[in-house]
Image: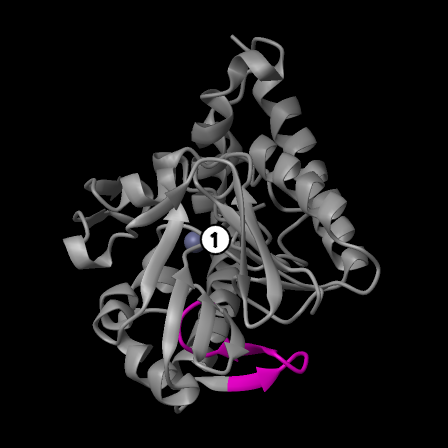
Amino acid sequence: MSPRRREFLYTLAKGAALGISRAAFTQASATLEKLTEKVALIAGAGNNIVALSGESGHLLVDCGDAAHAQDVLSLVGAIKTVINTHWHLESTGANEAMVKAGAKLVSSVDTQLWMTREIIHDWEKRTFPPRANEARPKETFYTTAITTFAGESVEYGVLPFAHTSGDTYVYFTQSNVLAVGDVVQPGRLPMLDWSTNGWIGGMQEAHRTLLRLANDTTRIVPGVGPVMTKADLQASLDTVTKIREHLVKLIKQGMGPKDMIQARAMKDFESQLAGDPDEFIYTAYRGLWAHARELGGIV
Ligand SMILES: [Zn+2]
């Protein structure tokens, strides 16, 4: 393929990704959609937010980005608790505003620790400074936890390192709604944040954990995109598995990230999955390399 054709296809893929984010960005404000009697999905405020409503206020899974904090507060009113699924600003940027409005922040220990550190995303040339003290969760957990809110059992726990380390699911068992954050990224080449331990093998394991939790009527809410079924989750795992097998095969042939980018290693996936293939290859490779032993000692 000529360099021009390759450039053109990449521009198309980037345009598709931009199209999605632009649509979200131009949304006048966040929207709320009821999933069950007590549980609602708030979209358009950064990453998806799941809200469980009780008489005295709400429990939220993630709270969106900082720019939409007021939108979220006016949509739901009083917020008692926010559980962060991971440290990214699309999901936790509104943490300070939620605390100011009286909420308690809860997260895994790793997610809280990432908020105390400067994090560098070399692939997008971005540096994230440590978060303000008020933005850091004060209640943390190492493995799993359970609480009762609005008469409903809320089970949450840490997943294997996938999108980041500290990735957390939250399961409203009676309403049968499972919030999974960015561990599941339907329709996209998955963003694997290797700078905070994300990698594709962990993403497979995290999918398997979630599949064990879900049943055929569970409504699964990813960080971005519409509500999924268990069958959709299985399809997402199948795609992630195919991508991993493909990348591992290429690494075992001695290819590095530059070789893979040059060879357009993701070309068979680009028509179905949005996202920048070059960025995906680089981040996926860094994460895989950190787990070389688990892949059978690739050197
Ligand atoms: Zn994320």
Residue found at the very far right of the displayed protein? 216
Q: Is 89 situated left or right of 129 in this image? A: right
Residue situated in front as seen by the camera: 100 or 162? 100
Residue holding disc 1: 276
Q: Quadrant of residue 245?
A: top right
Report the amino acid beneath label 1: Asp
Side of 185 relative to 3 (left or right): right
Relative image position of residue 195 (x, y in whole percent): 34, 36
Is 46 in the magenta? yes
Colour scheme in use: one colour
Quick check: can you spot residue 117? yes
Residues packed near mark 1 inside 10 Å, few (<14), some (14 to 19) or many (20 plus)? many
Query: Where 166 falls versus 78 (above or below)?
Result: above
Q: Residue at x 39, y 49 (%)?
A: 107
Q: Would you place residue 119 above or below residue 49 in this image?
A: above
Give the extent of the magenta segment: 32-47
| Quadrant in the rendering for residue 286 | top left
Q: Is residue 83 above or below residue 24?
A: above
Determine if the magenta segment contains residue 218: no
Q: Position of residue 95 (x, y in %)?
A: 29, 64
Q: Is residue 57 above or below residue 213?
A: below
Quarter for ligand 1? bottom left
Viewer-side residue, 154 vs 180: 154
Residue drawn at x 62%, y 60% as measured from the top left: 153
SS at mark 1 in the image: loop
Q: Residue at x 81, y 65 (%)?
A: 217
Q: Position of residue 33 (x, y in %)?
A: 59, 85
Say which of 249 and 196 sits in front: 196
Q: Pick the quarter of the image with the N terminus.
A: top right
